[in-house]
Image: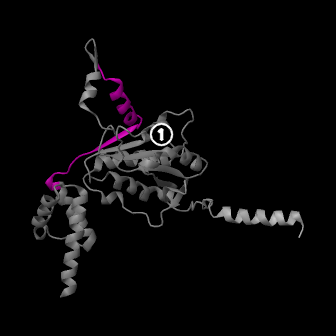
Amino acid sequence: MSEIEKLLKRAEGLLARLEGFLPAPSPDVDWKAMAFRWRRVNGRGLLQAVKKPHRIRLADLRDIDQQKKLVDANTRQFVDGKPANNVLLTGARGTGKSSLIKACLDRYSSRGLRLIEVDKDDLIDLPDIADLVADRPERFIVYCDDLSFEASETGYKALKAILDGSIAAPPANVLIYATSNRRHLMPEFMHENLETKYVGDEIHPGETAEEKISLSERFGLWVSFYPFDQDAYLDIAAYWLKEFGGKQVPQETWREEALQWTLLRGSRSGRVAWQFARDWAGRAASRRSAK
């Protein structure tokens, strides 16, 4: 064996050993999927198709008619290629904020709407996500659930840039839909009020407060959700009991249990009503099968 052949053989062996330390190539994106998650694997970001998206219809969402009207209209404009806004859905927990976004996907997926779920920690990858889908024919909603930032976090800067603060124009086929319990997305402290200045009769917030408010102001559409009263809670529970059981269930047979359920949970939200209905319907089905 010549010296060159020996050298080539050693080089091949070295490359074979090095391949075990290199990250695997990113898999091809399954663009036929209707929903995706952005994941980081071995330091690389990739779009992971969701095989079984959570399907929920707009008709399943009760007692938030005005909120449905606003978000549905904005989403329809987006799908139709017309001007539409990034959306911030804020308010009480369990009132249907994230479910409303999923319901819009269910309604418009056949017309090319797609959903990309991004964790807060991965928001720094938003420019990469935008570049990846910019030339696709579909319309993409980047979905950030339960979004809020602590004072020490800097991920909000990437979100600000993609919303309306970068030298590059955002892709026409991408919108941001975010849900949060906070209107301003960041904690606000009493000492920040000391920065407030008075100019004549006008109040001018300090720079710290302005910085925190500026993020939420970059969402063109704000949609607020409010706690449900008892009647709305019972209406939602009745709807889901019918969905789970296939027929209307007389309220007198479950009303007291539903109210006790809210006391134990400390909330009268739509989520709690849905959870009660699942529990009650499941127990009723078990009793019937035991007979």
Where disc 1 sits, the SS reads helix
Percent of width and height locating residue 232: 18, 55
Q: Quadrant of the N terminus?
A: bottom right
| Amino acid at the residue labelled 1 | Ala
What residue is at 27 percent from the left and 69 percent from the top?
243
Residue closer to the observer: 282 or 265? 265
Q: Indicate how the structure is coloured in the image.
A: one colour
Magenta-span inclusion, residue 205? yes
Residue closer to the observer: 258 or 80? 258
Magenta-span inclusion, residue 121? no
Q: Crowdedness of circle 1 by 10 Å Cα count: few (<14), some, many (20+)? A: some
Percent of width and height locating residue 81: 52, 45
Image-based side of 219 in relation to 34, left or right? left
Image-based side of 54 in relation to 267, left or right? right
Residue 241 seen anywhere in this rendered image of the structure: no
Q: Quadrant of the C terminus?
A: bottom left
Residue pointed to by mark 1 = 158
* Part of the protein shown in magenta: 203-231
